Image (tube, grey):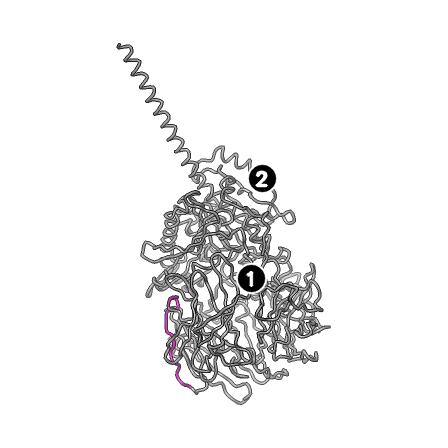
Amino acid sequence: MNVSSSLVQRNTLPFLKSACLRMTAPLGQPRGSAAARLRQTLRMVQAGRPMAAAADNSEATPPAMAHTDARTGYMLPPPEMAAVVDAPPEPTLSFSPDRKMVLQLGRPPSNPPISELARPELKLAGLRIDPETFSRSRMSYYTDLMFTPFHDALVLPAPAADCHHPTGIPPGSWINYARWSPDSRHVALTLRSSAEGARGPLRLWTVDTESWQAREVFPGTRGLNTIFISYDWMDSDTIIAALIPEDHPTLPVKPATVGGPKVEDNSSGKKSQARTYPDLLASPHDEAVFDHLGTSQLVSVKISTGAVTRLGPSKQYTGAHASPDGRYLLVSYFHRPYSYSVPCGRFPKSIELWSADGTPLRVIADLPLAEDIPVAFDSCRQGPRHLEWRDDKPAELAWIECQDGGDPAVAAEPRDIVYTLEAGDLEAEARPLVSTNLRCGGIVWGDDALALLYESEWKSRRSIVSTFSPGSGGAAPQVLFDRNYEDAYTDPGSPALRRTRWSTYVLARLDGARRLLLQGSGAGPTGSRPFLDVLEVDSKATRRLWQSSPPFFETTSTILSDEDERTITLDGLRILATRESEREPPQFYIKSFANDGRDISERCISAFPHPYPTLKGLSQEIVRYKRDDGVELNATLYLPPGYDKDRDGPLPCLLWAYPREYKDKAAAGQLRRSPHHFSAVGASSPLIFLTRGWAVLDGPGFPIVAEGDEEPNDTFLEQLTASARAAVEEVVRRGVAHPSAVAIAGHSYGAFMAANLLAHAPDLFACGVGRSGAYNRTLTPFSFQQEQRTLWEVPETYLKMSPFMHADKVRRPLLLIHGADDNNTGTFTLQSERFYAALKGHGCVTRLVVLPHESHGYRARESVMHALYEMNAWLDRFCRSALEGQRGAAGMVAGEDRAGEQKQGAAERSGDALVAAAAERDT
C-alpha cells in the first residue's frame, strides 16, 4: 500500500518546531498583544465554516493549521494526518472449506462519505434501520470479489491477473454476506446498488466456482429482508432466506396529529430496572413501523434447480437456523406486547422446531417480555437461553436455563442447567445434560465422549472450565481449569477447533484421543508470547509445541489440515498463523508440524505492504512504573520517526487511556501486550499524532482496584489521579515530555476519565480532549460501566465520580466532541451538551463539537477529518504552545545570563581602567 510522499512531511520535527504557534500566553497569564496577534492571524488563515456544530468558550477559534474541504465545508487536518486516514485498506480473505481456494474481497475506503450516514434511518427498539433497503443502516460492504487457487506458491493478495473473476455481477454493486457452501462449489452473497438516491433491498446471488458464473437467486421478488436474518446454507444445494413479503403494504404514515397520550403503566408494582438504552419505541406508530419493517417471509431455494419453497406465514422472524444435517429448522420470531423501556432483544419471542419444508413440529419456548432482568452482572433472562444446534450432532438442540430467576444475588445450586433435545423424537422431553453452580457461559462440543463446559462469576472474577462426556448419561463434570480470569499470566488458552462435514466446528482431538490443542496469548512479565500447547485432558499435563519468540509477535489461528474429516495428527498438522514485528506489518504464514510436532516448517503466503510509510521509523517501548500505592503499571510509549531526545529535547505528549476495574492488585499490573506488536495506526488511534511530532503514551494502566468486599468505584478518583500522576512523572523522568506540555484524552469512558482528571488533577495536564463521553452519572442511575449498584444505593459514589458535578473545578482547557446520534447506552449527546453548558457557566475554557449523523464512533470521512482537525488545533494551541513557551523562557534566561556575563566583563574591564587611572594620578 503506497501513500503519495507529497502528502506527508519527510521529516516532521524541524517543520513542526518552526510552524507551531508561539503567540498564546501560558495558561493563567494575561493575554496582551500576543492574543491580539493570534486573533488577527486566525482571521487571515481561517478558510471556512465547518458543518459540524461547534460551540466555543475559548477566547478565539483554534488555529487552523489545516484546510477546508471545499465540497462540504468540513475542516481537514494537516496533510500528514489525512494521509493516514486515507490509507487504502487491504482485502479481506476467506479460505474455502476444502482449503483449495481463497476468496479475495476488495474493500472500499475505510471512511464513507457523510452522504451515506445522512441516508434515511429509523431508530426503533434499539435498532437503526434503513427503510429503503430493509436492512440495518450504515452497513459496510465490499467492492469486488475474485478467487485464486490455494497452492504452494500462493502470495496474497493475489494479483488480479492471477485470479478468477465471476461474470454476470452488475458493475458498481456493493457486496455483503459472502459465504461458502459446505462443499465449496458455490459462494452466496448479497448485492445492492451503490447509486445515490433511493436504493432497493439486498438481492441474493450465487457464484459457481467451476464456471465462475454469477446469477441472481430470487429474480422477480422484492428482495431480502436482512434486518434480523440474511440467509443460511441448509446444505450444499439449499439456502434458507428471509424475503420481503410480496403483498407487503407501504410503510405506515405517521399521523398528522397525536392520537392520544403516551401511557406506560406499572400498576402491578413490579420491580423493573434498566440501563439508559437508546433508540427505543415511543409510540403506537413506532410499533406499527417496527412490525412493518421486521416482517419477512421465509423461503428455501434449491441452487441446482432454482425451485423455491415458501416456509410458514409472514412474521417478525429473528432467526432461522438449519440443523447441521439440514433436516430441521430452529425458527424464532417476535410478538407483542412490545416495550418502550427495553430494546427488542427483550421482547416476547417464540422459538419453534420446524421440518425443513416449513412444517411446525413443536414449540421449544415462548419467552415473555423481559423488562425485569436485574441490572447486576451475571443476570440473565428466565427461560431457555442460548438455544443452538449441537455442532457435533446431526440434529440435537441444546440450551441453558437459570435456576435463580436470573438474579445472581439469589442463592441457588445449581445456578444453571443445560438441556438437550433430539429433534427427531417429537414425543421426547428435554433432558438435563449438565449443571453449573456459577453462571453457565456455554459449551464447546467435541463428541459424545468429550466436551468443554464454561462457567464464571463476575463478583469473584472466577472462571471454571470442566470436561464432561455428553453421551455418558449424567456423569459429573471434571474440573480442568479453575482460576481468576483477571490473571492473564495463568490463562491456559482456548481449544483449537476443526471443521466437520456439516461445516460446523468442534474440538480438534489429536489422533482421536483425549488430547487437545490449546492456543493462548502467553501473557507474561516480558510481554505476550502466544503459544500452541498439547493438553492431555485426563492428566492435565501440557507440552509446548510452539511459542512466539522475539523479535516477532506471532499467533496461530485456523487448522488447515482438517479436510474431509480426516483425523488431526501432529504429523502433518498445518495451521494458519500471522507474524508481525515492530517494523513490519502482519503477514500470513502456514506452519507445518512433523515428527510428533517437534519439527516445524513454515512458509509466508502474503506480502502486504507497510500501510503508513512515513511512520515506518517510529519508536515504541513498553514502559514499566509504579503507582504510589505500589500497584505495578505499564504503557506503550511511542515516539515519532527521526526523534532524538538529546538533540530535540522534550516533545508535547498525549496520554490516551481507559480506566478498567480489577479485584486483584497483582492482576491489575500485569503486562498484556507485546513489545513486538506492529503499531496499527488508524483514524481513531491516538498514534496518528505521531505524524505531528508528538510523543504518545498509549494505554497507560489506569486500574481501579478493590480487593475483597470493597467496590472499585468507592476510591475511583483517588486511584485515577494516582495512576495519572505516575504516568506523567514517568514520561517526564525519561526526558521525552515536559511537565507543562502533557495532554490527556480518551473516548467514551476514557472521555469521562479525562474530564475527571482536569477537575481533580489540573496540575498534571495542559489541556484535555473528551470524545463521546458521559459526564453526569445521575443520568445513568441504574448502573454504568462495571458499577452494578444504583444511584439510590450509593448516591455519594455517583456524585463524586461525575465531572459534571465538579465543573467549577475544571481550570484547564477541555475540548468535547460527540456524535449527534450517539447510540451507545448512557452516552447520549445530551451528556456533552449539558457538561459544556456547565463548564461555560463557570468560565472554563472549553469547546463543544457535535458531528452530524455520527453515533458513538465516528465513521464518515468528513467527520473523522474534522474531529482530527479540532483535536490537532486544540492540542497545538494549549499543549504544544506551552512547551514552546517553556523553550522561549529558557532561551530568555539563557540570553539574560549571557548578557549578565557580558555586563560583568565590561564592568571588570572598566574597573581595571579606573584603577590604572587612579594610579597614574597618584604617581
Q: Judge whether residue 539 can be spotted in this image.
A: yes
| Residue 445 coordinates in the image, percent (x, y) | 48, 79
Residue that mark 2 sits on: 45
Name the outermost residue toward the left. 922
Magenta highlight range? 474-489
Q: Could you tell me how far apart the alpha carbons at marks 2 and 1 are, in whole angstroms?
A: 43 Å
Disc 2 marks which amino acid? Answer: Val
Mark closer to the chain start, 2 or 1: 2
Marks 2, 1: nearer the viewer: 1
Left/right of residue 713 with respect to residue 839 in the rendered view: left
Depth check, front residue: 762 or 559: 559
| Residue 869 coordinates in the image, percent (x, y) | 55, 48
Depth check, front residue: 171 or 876: 171
Residue that mark 1 sits on: 607
Mark 2, residues whose alpha carbon is within 10 Å: few (<14), some, or many (≥20)?
Answer: some
Q: Is residue 88 above or below residue 224?
A: above
Residue 475 lies within the magenta run: yes
Q: Judge whether residue 432 can be spotted in this image.
A: no
Left/right of residue 670 with respect to residue 442 in the rendered view: left
Disc 1 marks which amino acid? Answer: Ala
Depth check, front residue: 186 or 275: 186
Label 1 sits on a secondary structure element that is: loop
For residue 716, the mark is none
Name the outermost residue toward the right. 220
Label 2 sits on a secondary structure element that is: helix
Quarter of the figure that contains the C terminus: top left
Q: Residue at x 49, y 85 (%)?
A: 430
Residue 458 lies within the magenta run: no
